[in-house]
Amino acid sequence: MTRTVIAQGTFDILHPGHVHYLEEAAAMGDELYVIVARKANVDHKAKPICPATQRRDVVDALEAVDEAILGHEEDIFVPIEELDPDVIALGHDQHHDDEAIRSELERRGIDCEVRRASAGEPTDGDQLLSTRLIIDRILERRG
């Protein structure tokens, strides 16, 4: 029996923290599907810089990812219903309320586990594991 995992995120400027999250999510099962957020659904931080299709294509190119898809523009749970996962893997710092997600999954009749990935650790002192930190560094050096 195949164990399906869903990870999700904005993935605006892909960095080692994203890779760590997705590799850890992939290790939670046999197949990893990644839902890339649409700009319209990003309301907890600055809107993404890169177009959704570009972000999806870059995530889809990662070895740990079996398939990256675009999120639904109105209801973020639609792809989850369609994929019917065994696990939803959340990033260690994602803004989602785990219990609210579990409640909505239960309400929709989706039986799956919700787990948090661990934080990635920088491999050297100069490594940036956050899109925000990358943008801040760019602005500092070139802004």
Image (cartoon, grey):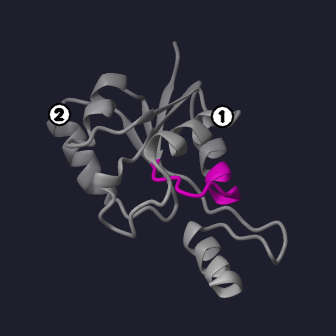
Q: Is residue 26 above or below residue 138?
A: above
Query: Residue at horizontal 32%, vertical 31%?
Result: 79
- The residue type indicated by label 1 comes to Ala
The x, y position of residue 91, in whole percent, is: 51, 55
Name the residue carrying label 2: 108
The span picked out in magenta is: 9-20
Q: Is residue 135 above or below residue 10?
A: below
Name the residue carrying label 1: 61
Residue 111 visible in the snapshot? no
- Outermost residue toward the front in this view: 143
Camera-nearest residue between 45 and 21: 45
Q: Is residue 88 above or below residue 94?
A: above
Mark 2 lies on a secondary structure that is loop
Mark nearer the viewer, 2 or 1: 1
Quadrant hosting residue 137: bottom right
Gap in angstroms between the C-alphas marked 2 and 1: 31 Å
Residue 104 visible in the snapshot? yes
Query: Residue at horizontal 66%, vertical 87%?
Result: 140
The x, y position of residue 113, in whole percent, is: 39, 39
The x, y position of residue 143, in whole percent, is: 62, 84
Mark 1 lies on a secondary structure that is loop
Whether residue 112 is in magenta: the answer is no
* Disc 1 residue crowd, few under 14, some 14–19, many 20+, Cα 10 Å: few
The x, y position of residue 85, in whole percent, is: 40, 28
Q: Is residue 56 left or right of residue 139?
A: left
Between discs 2 and 1, the one toward the N terminus: 1
